[in-house]
Image (tube, rainbow, N blue to C red):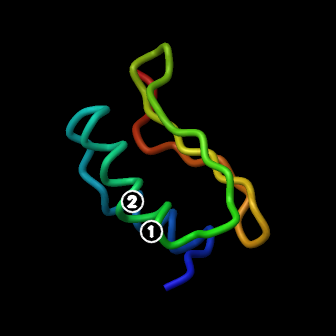
């Protein structure tokens, strides 16, 4: 299934953040594997949050997986 910005936001809305390592693994298996030809940046923020940025032909958007503390 090819993701859209809306389907990724739905995935994030239903995601339960555990820790950075788990989030990275889950993003790789739940989102990245389904979007070829896209660039990704994801990881923790300096304020305790976690973000995902996607750039590509079908999705170009920044997502907040976990809000800053």
The secondary structure type at the circle numbered 2 is helix
Residue drawn at x 25%, y 42% as measured from the top left: 22
Residue 33 marker: none
* C-alpha gap between disc 1 and disc 2: 5 Å
Direction from residue 26 to residue 1 in the image, left or right: right
User: Residue 54 location, x and y as percent?
Assistant: 65, 52
Quarter of the image for residue 3 reads bottom right
Of residue 37 and residue 47, the one placed in the foreground of this image is 37
Circles 1 and 2: CB distance less than 8 Å?
A: yes
The label number, if any, that marks residue 13 in the structure image: 2
Residue 35 location, quadrant: bottom right
Q: Residue at x 62, y 69 (%)?
A: 36
Identity of the residue furthest to the top in this view: 46
Q: Quadrant of the C terminus?
A: top left
Label at residue 10? 1
**Residue 16, image x, y percentages:** 24, 51
Q: Residues within 10 Å of mark 2 (few under 14, many from 20)?
A: few
- Is residue 31 shown above or below 65? below
Image location of residue 57, percent across then percent down: 79, 69
**Would residue 10 be found to the left or right of residue 25 on screen?**
right
Task: Determine the image quadrant of residue 55.
Answer: bottom right
Closer to the camera in the image, 17 or 30? 30
Outermost residue toward the right? 57
């Amino acid at each position: 299934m090819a993701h859209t910005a809306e389907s990724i936001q739905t995935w994030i809305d239903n995601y339960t953040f555990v820790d950075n390592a788990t989030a990275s693994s889950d993003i790789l298996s739940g989102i990245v594997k389904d979007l070829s030809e896209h660039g990704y940046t994801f990881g923790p923020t300096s304020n305790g949050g976690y973000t995902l940025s996607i750039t590509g032909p079908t999705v170009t958007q920044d997502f907040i997986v976990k809000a800053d503390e």
